[in-house]
């Protein structure tokens, strides 16, 4: 038992049949970012307040340099232009405001991100995207999760600095322009170049680079996954050197791409810096009265210190521009996956599920997407309430699609599915699902306790119910033997249990659900012949009175069944009962 | 626990030392840039001082010296060049460091071999190699140079400031010294806070990922509303905990801000007082000199604190490194297999395989996986290993493949203990087909040639025909050039197994190990795969582990295993 389970646990995630995930909605990066901003409206006040605090902190920072310069210069001219008290206030303001800004802005950001995560989860759950999880695109989903994480930079590193620069710009124009119009315009133009033009250029050129970097990273990931997942093959065929070379080639391509981006960013940075230096130089020229109209010494000092400080804050925007491309791509992926076209959900589905649980499929045609082949081509089935039926066929023939259709994780393109005589398209999806309990290879064990995993099937189940379900699934002895019993943490995907134990915990959860229909999609995968037979025998007794739909590629002979169909070419043919 | 911490610290220190060589050019450019910045501050101070004194005297002072107006832009160009060089060199340092680490980690993984997968999930290993190491870019590119620059650059700046105005240097120096103290105090506070929160934070982050992965299960169980609410609570808790850490962590950067503000104010007030006194006494050349020095000191303040600030910013990069260290230190070290005196190769023509009283235990808590197992398979014959899973079949296979070594007894190939055979020679005599072959991302052709990259077209065609790959080849979109594996065309279990058989044909090894090759196939496919395997078995020493009833197709010896012991033998096994 243990051996088998361990070997099945180390199999790489089933990749053979993972269909490419195709988002149905198309967005540009900008539209996607707008959708995200729309979601953040609830935290709008906090986010705006965070930006305002940042602005105040920046103003204090600018003022600090300016007033200390002025104080010194004023003394030279024999007057105290700036009092010590003002200096102290500006100084204290600078430190506290900066601290408050960072705290507040981060807090607002985390709130917004929390909203985003909940929204993402909800959209995935409600949209047809539930079909994604059904089709086991787990890796894809986890990548999306890191995309959401990447979006925290959107506010902190792009929006806030941009707002600050946007307000520094007119302030600089006015303050400098009041002394000398020519100088004001010159410094203003240079500031705009440094904090808007350069970041924009780098963001534009970075978009393609971001796409390419994502592609190269994916390539590296695949070759590493190949190497790690294929360690047995590699050792058995003595292919260590070759596979290592492959990974290194992918690594080199990625690093080379990154180097090109880094080089471009370095030049952009230097360019932004030179714009700032030009501005400072022009102020110096104006003070000296060279080429530019001369300005007063005192004003000169004040403007010089202000300019130095203003351009210092503009430097961060170049980096922001560099990240804008990456964030745009992240935003697009997240939004495209979550926002599904509303068309599929516009039908009225207020109906509750009828009490009768007979199922009828009438001439159902189905395919997962427009450009995929038809899976079901006019399937007709009749499953009376309480019947025990099997649907057989080799893998890839459409058995799991059938389960998806029954559970309303997908909808047929043609034909109808009736539950108790009602078209299930008119019944609320959750009402349909409350009638059906589902167990398949894709059934997920959550990184939680055994108890929490079981309660997912029926939240109000008592301790006795839990043990009864575990008994029925023939796993109660195992759980009893664990030191922490029901409160044992099962680990990610149930990794702390052996594969067979995990399957049976999942079965217990399915049996616990009060649903009158059980859909068992290859429930015994990964169990050895003897355990499989025991498992199926249990099913014969525990599911008394419920409709059982067993989906499998073969029968073992111990199942008690009323009807058997064989799926082929998209239709069902009755086999011996 | 303490050991582990020390190991992490040593690892981080070692990586810093290794990274420092690549970062040398970043440090050099940074120092040069600081010097140029100081030069610029001097130019600006001279111009301003001149203008102020001229103004004070009544507008008509001496003409401005020309040199600051030439030197300033020249130094600006120099600084821009330094910045480019530093940025590029930092990127390079990050790349060099990551490439080296990735190579080392891959070597460890290959050295650990399949046994590693028993402890660690392949996804975890892959994310270590890809993401964890990718996150170390900042460690090599930013943290390592910053950890040198934060000391060197301020000291370098203090020198000219000290020459021009010793008091300013003292003020700057004292404020600068306050920074590491503040960093230490608040840094330790932040570390304590984050240690207290860390477990909870990782668990909450993992929860989101876990719920997303299992979203179908949640939806189909009708628990969407519930889980959404819980997820919202978890996200809120995550925020509260993170903010607790940040509240302390931000204090350390606030301490830099504070030190800088104090420096500014002190300089402005003290130098202002001095200037006021001098102005009253009216000595203009001395006043000019003092004003220039004071302005210079004031303009040098941002330059002085810039390296300290980047040091504080780079601190989180160090945290990434420590995170990665935990995972990397967990991998087995690459040890050269000791060259045994008896290291030998195996005669490739006909191999007799034998187990001599072999015992093996994976985990003492679960008891032995194999006990006193002995059998002999003469060259060219077949042995079927039967029994339920957990009986020890897979352990026997792993022993034969050399993935693990027997704890008792010997595994013999033509009489030679397996451990004395060089790995290359062993992999040359053994072919292995498991439950589900791994298909690598690439074309079908590449996947089959994996077994023998230098095979010619004729050999390939033979293998395709013998493994019956050519039967389903026409159904693939691009024939042999169809992309399969991750992101490619999906093959059925039977088709994948035929690719494994084709690989074995190409490899043409005298020993064939079959580990439940039909476990995931339906009966019709199973039968035809067994037929192909029977053809492949001709003339080879075959060991077939299976609990399929169809195994009777293989004539030969048979042993039944239960709980790691041989309970029944048929034939001359």
Image: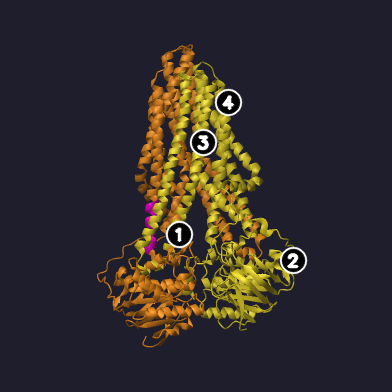
Front label number (3 vs 1): 3
Is B402 located above or below residue B282 in the figure?
Answer: below
Q: What stretch is highlighted in magenta?
A: B98-111
Of mark 2 and mark 4, the one earlier in the sequence is 4
Q: Would residue B365 be seen by someone viewing this image from the given angle?
A: no
Residue with the mark numbered 4: A174
Of mark 2 and mark 3, the one earlier in the sequence is 3
Residue with the mark numbered 1: A222
Which chain letter goes with mark 4?
A
Residue with the mark numbered 3: A197
Of mark 3 and mark 4, the one earlier in the sequence is 4
Compute the Cα span from label 2 to label 4.
Answer: 67 Å
Of mark 2 and mark 1, the one earlier in the sequence is 1
Compute the Cα span from label 3 to label 4.
Answer: 20 Å
Q: Position of residue A524 (x, y in %)?
A: 55, 75
Report the front residue among B98 and A139.
A139
Q: Position of residue B380 (x, y in %)?
A: 33, 82
Compute the Cα span from label 2 to label 3.
Answer: 58 Å
What secondary structure is marked by label 4?
helix
Report the front residue among A519 and B462.
B462
Compute the Cα span from label 4 to label 1.
Answer: 55 Å
Marks 2, 3 in one chain: yes
Of mark 4 and mark 1, the one earlier in the sequence is 4
What secondary structure is marked by label 3?
helix
For label 4, the crowd category at 10 Å Cα-Cα, with few meaning under 14, some 14 to 19 and many 20 or more, is some
């Amino acid at each position: 038992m243990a051996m088998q389970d361990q070997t099945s646990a180390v199999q790489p995630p089933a990749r053979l049949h993972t269909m490419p995930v195709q988002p149905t909605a198309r967005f540009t990066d900008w539209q996607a970012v707008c959708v995200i901003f729309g979601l953040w409206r609830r935290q709008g006040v906090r986010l705006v307040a965070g930006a305002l605090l940042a602005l105040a902190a920046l103003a204090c920072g600018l003022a600090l340099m300016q007033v200390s310069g002025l104080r010194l210069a004023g003394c030279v001219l024999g007057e105290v232009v700036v009092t010590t008290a003002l200096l102290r206030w500006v100084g204290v303001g600078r430190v506290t405001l900066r601290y408050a800004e960072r705290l507040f802005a981060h807090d607002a950001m985390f709130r917004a991100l929390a909203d985003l995560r909940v929204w993402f989860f909800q959209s995935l759950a409600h949209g047809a995207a539930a079909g994604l999880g059904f089709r086991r695109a787990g890796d894809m989903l986890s990548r999306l999760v890191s995309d959401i994480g990447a979006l925290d930079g959107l506010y902190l590193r792009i929006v806030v600095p941009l707002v600050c620069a946007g307000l520094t710009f007119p302030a600089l124009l006015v303050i400098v322009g009041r002394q000398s119009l020519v100088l004001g315009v010159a410094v203003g133009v240079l500031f705009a170049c440094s904090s808007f033009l350069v970041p924009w250029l780098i963001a534009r050129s970075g978009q393609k680079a971001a796409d390419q970097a994502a592609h190269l990273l994916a390539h590296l990931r695949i070759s590493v996954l190949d190497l790690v997942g294929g360690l047995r093959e590699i050792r058995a065929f003595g292919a260590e050197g070759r596979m290592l070379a492959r990974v290194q080639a992918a690594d080199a391509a990625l690093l080379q791409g990154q180097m090109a981006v880094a080089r471009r960013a370095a030049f952009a940075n230097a360019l932004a810096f030179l714009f700032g230096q030009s501005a400072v130089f022009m102020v110096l020229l104006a003070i000296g009265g060279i080429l530019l109209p001369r300005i007063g010494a005192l004003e000169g000092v004040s403007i010089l210190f202000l300019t130095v400080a203003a351009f210092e804050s503009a430097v961060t925007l170049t980096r922001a521009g560099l990240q804008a491309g990456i964030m745009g791509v992240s935003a697009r992926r997240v939004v495209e996956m979550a926002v599904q076209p509303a068309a599929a959900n516009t039908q009225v589905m207020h109906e509750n599920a009828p009490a009768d649980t007979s199922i009828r499929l009438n001439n159902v045609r189905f395919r997962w997407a427009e450009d995929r082949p038809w899976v079901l081509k006019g399937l007709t089935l009749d499953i009376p309430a309480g019947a025990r039926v099997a649907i057989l066929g080799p893998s890839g023939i459409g058995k799991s699609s059938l389960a998806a259709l029954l559970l309303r994780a997908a909808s047929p393109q043609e034909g109808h599915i009736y539950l108790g005589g009602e078209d299930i398209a008119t019944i609320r999806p959750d009402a349909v699902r409350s009638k059906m309990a589902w167990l398949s290879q894709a059934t997920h064990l959550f990184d939680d306790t055994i108890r929490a995993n079981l309660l997912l099937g029926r939240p109000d189940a008592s301790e006795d119910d839990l043990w009864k379900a575990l008994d029925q699934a023939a796993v109660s002895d195992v759980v009893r033997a664990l030191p922490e019993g029901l409160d044992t943490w099962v680990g990610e995907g149930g990794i702390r249990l052996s594969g067979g134990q995990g399957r049976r915990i999942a079965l217990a959860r399915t049996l616990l659900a009060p649903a009158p229909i059980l859909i068992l999609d290859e429930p015994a995968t990964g169990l050895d012949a003897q355990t499989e037979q025991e498992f199926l025998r249990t099913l014969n007794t525990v599911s008394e009175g419920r409709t059982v739909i067993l989906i499998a590629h073969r029968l073992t002979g111990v199942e008690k069944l009323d009807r058997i169909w064989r799926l082929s070419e998209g239709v069902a043919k009755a086999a011996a009962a | 626990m303490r050991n582990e911490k020390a190991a992490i610290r040593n690892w981080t220190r070692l990586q810093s030392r290794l990274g420092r060589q690549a970062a040398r050019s970043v440090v050099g450019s940074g120092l040069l840039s600081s010097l140029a910045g100081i030069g610029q501050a001097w130019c600006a101070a001279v111009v301003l001082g001149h203008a102020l004194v001229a103004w004070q005297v009544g507008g008509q002072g001496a003409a401005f010296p020309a040199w600051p107006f030439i030197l300033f832009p020249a130094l600006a160009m120099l600084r821009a060049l330094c910045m480019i060089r530093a940025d590029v060199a930092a990127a390079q340092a990050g790349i060099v460091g990551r490439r080296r680490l990735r190579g080392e980690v891959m070597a460890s993984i290959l050295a650990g071999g399949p046994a590693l997968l028993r402890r660690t999930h392949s996804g975890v290993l892959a994310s270590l190699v890809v993401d964890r190491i990718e996150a170390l870019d900042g460690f090599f590119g930013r943290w390592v140079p910053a950890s040198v620059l934060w000391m060197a650059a301020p000291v370098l700046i203090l020198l000219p400031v000290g020459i021009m105005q010793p008091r300013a240097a003292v003020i700057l120096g004292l404020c600068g010294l306050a920074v590491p103290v503040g960093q230490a105090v608040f840094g330790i506070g932040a570390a304590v806070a984050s240690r207290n929160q860390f477990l909870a934070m990782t668990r909450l982050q993992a929860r989101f990922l876990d719920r997303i992965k299992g979203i179908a299960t949640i939806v189909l169980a009708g628990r969407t509303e519930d889980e959404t609410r819980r997820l919202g609570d978890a996200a809120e808790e995550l925020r509260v905990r993170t903010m607790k850490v940040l509240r302390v962590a931000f204090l350390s950067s606030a301490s830099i801000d504070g030190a800088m503000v104090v420096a500014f104010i002190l300089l402005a007030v003290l130098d202002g007082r001095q200037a006021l006194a001098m102005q009253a006494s009216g000595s203009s050349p001395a006043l000019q000199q003092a004003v220039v020095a004071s302005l210079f000191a004031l303009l040098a303040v941002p330059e002085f604190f810039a390296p300290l600030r980047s040091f504080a910013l780079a601190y989180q990069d160090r945290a990434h490194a420590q995170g990665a260290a935990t995972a990397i230190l967990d991998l087995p070290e690459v040890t050269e297999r000791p060259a045994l005196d008896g290291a030998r190769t195996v005669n490739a023509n006909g191999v007799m395989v034998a187990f001599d009283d072999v015992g093996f235990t994976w985990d003492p808590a679960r008891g032995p996986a194999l006990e006193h197992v002995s059998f002999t398979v003469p060259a060219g014959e077949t042995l079927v290993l039967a029994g339920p899973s957990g009986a020890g079949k897979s352990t026997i296979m792993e022993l034969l493949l050399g993935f693990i070594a027997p704890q008792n007894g010997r595994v013999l190939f033509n009489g030679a203990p397996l451990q004395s055979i060089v790995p290359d020679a062993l992999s040359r005599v053994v072919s292995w087909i498991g439950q589900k072959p791994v298909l690598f991302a690439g074309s079908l052709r590449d996947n089959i040639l994996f077994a023998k990259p230098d095979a010619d077209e004729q050999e390939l065609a033979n293998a395709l025909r013998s493994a019956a790959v050519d039967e389903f080849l026409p159904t693939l979109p691009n024939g042999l050039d169809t992309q399969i594996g991750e992101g490619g065309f999906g093959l059925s279990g039977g088709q994948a197994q035929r690719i494994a058989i084709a690989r074995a044909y190409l490899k043409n090894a005298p020993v064939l190990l079959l580990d439940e090759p039909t476990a995931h196939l339906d009966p019709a496919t199973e039968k035809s795969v067994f037929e192909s395997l029977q053809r492949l078995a001709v003339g080879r020493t075959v060991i077939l582990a299976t609990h399929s009833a169809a195994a009777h197709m293989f004539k030969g010896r048979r042993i039944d295993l239960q709980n790691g012991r041989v309970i029944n033998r048929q034939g001359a096994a």
